[in-house]
Image: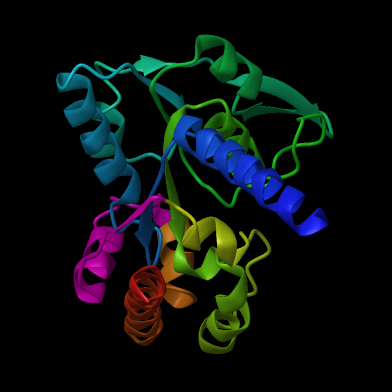
Amino acid sequence: MEQNRSKPDELLRQMKREEEDSRRGHLKIFFGYAAGVGKTYAMLKAAHMAKRRGIDVVVGYVEPHARPQTAQLLNGLELLPTREVQHGGITLHEFDLDAAIARKPQLILVDELAHTNATGCRHLKRYQDINELLVQGIDVYTTVNVQHIESLNDLVASITGVIVKERIPDSVFDDADEVKLVDIEPKELIERLNEGKIYRKVQAERALGNFFTVQNLVALREIALRRCADRINRLSG
């Protein structure tokens, strides 16, 4: 008798899960192996395409790098004001989660998936903000680099000598509805760095002497390609 009752109970739970999944927003990650490969640029291009299809698109947060081509793509898109947070006497500009939920667009852009929020924000990490948007039924475009994936952190550190503190759980990456790899040749990336298209001069010189070596970039690119292939195999397996 108990077993007979458990079947309809399990069926109801399954129906509830399916209903929640159908209402949940879709997450698309623009994925790269290093800063400057063009993740945010590709995300903004995709946002303009979505807008032309009649989708209600809002830019929730885009990292304000000094990259003219990327900044130009913000033109024509609705920008959500950032939230000012005081931290150690400095005014920080964070993504305004509550304003985004109140606005409730069909699609919102929130850059830097692995970002750690300032004290005073509702969630510690930006990927937690994004999950709340997804629960609200809002589709999200975001960006992340390979070194921010938790399981790859030690491997990346052994190659580059850099320990990345801002990380996301592998499940956030694997459970995304879509991952788009944004890829360019390492030598082209270094050329872009030398031309000042990624960082300002002093920061670029520091990067070239540390993280942005051809050897490091080739290795990171291979890891990113392999991680995307592993994700596809998991989904199709």
- Total marks shown come to 0
Q: Residue 44 at x, y = what percent? A: 28, 35
88 vs 134, nearest the viewer: 134
Q: What residue is shown at x 28% (from left), y 50% (from top)?
A: 197
Q: What residue is shown at x 77% (from left), y 30% (from top)?
A: 122
192 relative position to 93: left or right: left
Q: What residue is shown at x 27% (from left), y 59% (from top)?
A: 182
Residue 117 found in image quarter:
top right
67 vs 136, nearest the viewer: 136
68 relative position to 3: left or right: left
Q: Residue 35 at x, y = what percent? A: 40, 58
Quadrant for the C terminus, please. Answer: bottom left
109 vs 17, nearest the viewer: 17
195 vs 122, nearest the viewer: 122
Q: Residue 173 at x, y = what percent? A: 49, 59
115 relative position to 226: left or right: right
Image colouring: rainbow
Q: Is residue 126 visible?
A: no
Magenta stretch, residue numbers: 177-201
Residue 89 found in image quarter:
top right
